[in-house]
Amino acid sequence: MGGPDFAAPDWGDLSAYTYLMAGDRSAFAWEWLRRSPEYQIAAVTPSSSPAQFGLCRFEDPKLSAMEGYPIWRSESDPSVLSTVAHPVCGGEAFDITVLQRWTVVQIDAQGEHWRIGHDLRSIRLDIIQGTLREGPVQLEYRIGGLADAIPAVLTLQRFIALACTRRWPAKLFPREVRATRWIATLRAHDAVMAGASQREIAARLFGDAVIGPRWRTTAPSYRLRVQRLVAGARAMANGGWRTFLDSPSRKSSPEID
């Protein structure tokens, strides 16, 4: 497990963050959560509950979105698709073993929490009745009201495409258009935590050539951009990261968008 000795990437090295260009919103949520000192301590404290952080189980905060497998709770992530598994043979039976290389599961009193992930993108299924672990099943999908249905239906589309083709449905996971901005905000956070000044952040992010010795007056636009990144980073670190788990159609954060 992780702990207070968590070490962020070298904020000055863009290549340490570029893997996130392929990440979905939940990947960015995890990158922010694993940076939280509160989470780092809770992850190694036996009496702590992962539910307070929106997770079904603690994930090692030392693991990046590329390496870890966070399983978000349905209360935090509206894209989680709730299903009932009915034992059946033949016909439209679904067998989770055909997707075994992509799956991780957490089991508790509420049922089975399945994460199906590939290349920083994931699909979440909750089996609220029955099980996927005992052979082929017929799945019954439980989708709520209009607002909650939007992200759940998208998950259903992705899952059906994956289950039918046994290939990751990359076309249903378009790249996040704001990923570059989100990465810059993460770098700004890591820079501040490392003790960097706003001028140092501007020089690394935008280049020494545009940041002169009197940058407060000669490069006011870059100063403003850094200030906005730092403000956004503070908002994310203070719990704003949870908005990454919301469907963009339901809610969006000015700092994210």
Image: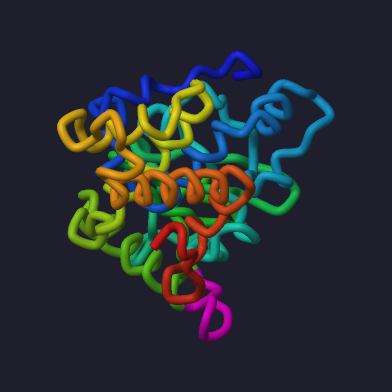
147 is within the stretch colored magenta:
yes
Residue lying at the far left of the rendered structure: 209
Range shown magenta: 140-149
Which residue is depicted at the point 25% across and 58% down?
A: 177
- In depth, the one of 171 and 33 nearer the eye is 33
| Image position, residue 200 (x, y; %) | 36, 27
Question: Residue, x 71% and y 21% (percent of image)?
Answer: 44
The quadrant in which the N terminus is found is top right
Question: Does 145 sit above or below residue 227?
Answer: below
What residue is rendered at 60% in x and 14% in y?
Answer: 5
Depth check: give the residue in front, 36 or 247.
Answer: 36
Q: Does the magenta stretch include residue 90?
A: no
Task: Answer left or right for 59 relative to 17.
Answer: right
Q: Which residue is drawn at 42% across and 38% down?
A: 186
Total count of labels: 0
Instruction: Locate residue 42 relative to residue 117 in the image: left or right.
Output: right
Q: Which residue lies furthest to the top in this view?
A: 5
Relative height, residue 125 to residue 13 (above, below): below
> Residue 22: horizontal and vertical position, in percent?
25, 44
Q: For this rendering, which residue is in front, 40 or 88?
A: 40
Rendering coords of residue 25 (x, y %): 40, 53
Quick check: 5 left or right of 244? right
Q: Which of 26 and 204 is in front in this view?
A: 204
Picture colour scheme: rainbow
- Give how far across and how far down residue 76 sits, in percent: 61, 58
Of the 4 image quadrants, the one containing the C terminus is: bottom left
Left or right of 244? Residue 211 is left
